[in-house]
Image (cartoon, helix red, strand yellow):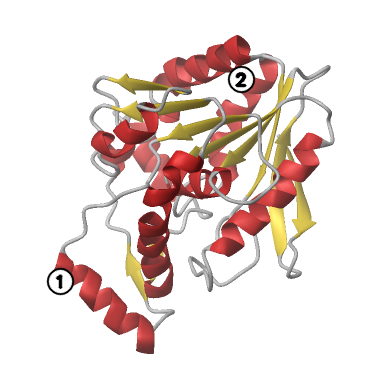
Amino acid sequence: MNPGTRTAADGTKLATQRWTASSPRAAVVLVHGLAEHLGRYDHVGSQLAARGFDVRGSDLRGFGRSEGERAYIEDFDQYTSDLEGDLTAAADLGVPVVLLGHSLGGLIAALYAAGEHPQPNLLILSAPAVEAKVPAAKAAGALFLVRFFPKLKVSNGLKGDQLSNDPAVGEKYFADPLVYPKSTVRLGVAFLEAMKRCRPLLDRITQPTLVIHGGSDTIVDPAFSERLGARPEARRVVFDGLQHETFNEDGGRLAISTVADWIDTQL
């Protein structure tokens, strides 16, 4: 893992990670999920690099080692704008580009692929958070609070056993100083608005797509990814019994090999 930094279009310094492969056959851009950072994907990047794929990405602004108010975003499109910088750099390698997003990162990747941006050749969505079950009263409360207290921080309420069947994953998650298990009200509202905006745009995604999901995911309901996997150019794989972070089940063995094998078939 090779850490670094880059500067976003608005001057924000973003922390980067890269796992290089000699004579890469494809370039993979990783987008992590809510509260976390790319350092948690070292085993993913290393194993994909060993399969001949150059892997890179940036900590989302406000998370990990990147600059920005913790867990805060003014405009959700800042995420897709930041992502364009990573994809542009990956394209400079002159090989097919793969965009891989997990959870919140899956929503960002889906919005990016449905938008007017330089596009990747392949798309991989891991437990993409394109929908959520939010009680109406809670959503209304968030819309009220964001007007007066946009930077109010509340716990995400996640539990370690929701991430993986391996207890060590949750223990490391909550002991990680770069994990920020809270969200501002503004980020929560922007997240919900982005989901609503994304759903009618999903049919604009045209590149070959792999969707992977843990069958026992209680953070992002597996049913939410069914529409993405039903498209003719898509393949959807549900891992029975696995939780939200399939890359952290059994060291990611099954999920990572599924991703690498699928990229190989597309190349």
What residue is shown at x 77% (from left), y 27% (from top)? 20
What residue is shown at x 61% (from left), y 69% (from top)? 68
Kindly identify the amino acid type of the residue bearing the numbered disc 2: Gln
Instruction: Answer yes or no: is residue 257 visible.
Output: yes
| Left/right of residue 5 with respect to residue 198 in the rendered view | right
Say if mark 2 contacts mark 1, CB within 8 Å: no
Q: Which residue is mark 1?
A: 137
| Left/right of residue 8 with respect to residue 227 in the rendered view | right
Q: Position of residue 196 (x, y in %)?
A: 35, 58
- Comparing 42 with 255, the one in front is 255
Q: Position of residue 106 (x, y in %)?
A: 47, 42
Q: Earlier in the sequence, mark 2 or mark 1?
A: 2
Comparing labels 2 and 1, the label whose residue is closer to the camera? 1
On screen, residue 124 above or below 71: above
Give the farthest residue toward the bottom: 148
Report the quarter where the N terminus lies: top right
- Provide the secondary structure element on which disc 2 rests: helix
Report the quarter where the C terminus lies: top right
Quote the CA–CA distance across marks 2 and 1. 44 Å
Mark carried by residue 183? none
- Comparing 142 with 37, the one in front is 142
Please tell me how crowded label 1 is: few (under 14), some (14-19), or many (20+) other residues with Cα within 10 Å: few
Q: Position of residue 83 (x, y in %)?
A: 65, 50
- Provide the secondary structure element on which disc 1 rests: helix
Q: Which residue is mark 2?
A: 47
What residue is shown at x 42% (from left), y 52% (from top)? 198
| Left/right of residue 77 with respect to residue 24 in the rendered view | left
Please tell me how crowded label 2 is: few (under 14), some (14-19), or many (20+) other residues with Cα within 10 Å: some
- Comparing 230 with 134, the one in front is 230
Kindly identify the amino acid type of the residue bearing the numbered disc 1: Ala
On screen, residue 44 above or below 182: above
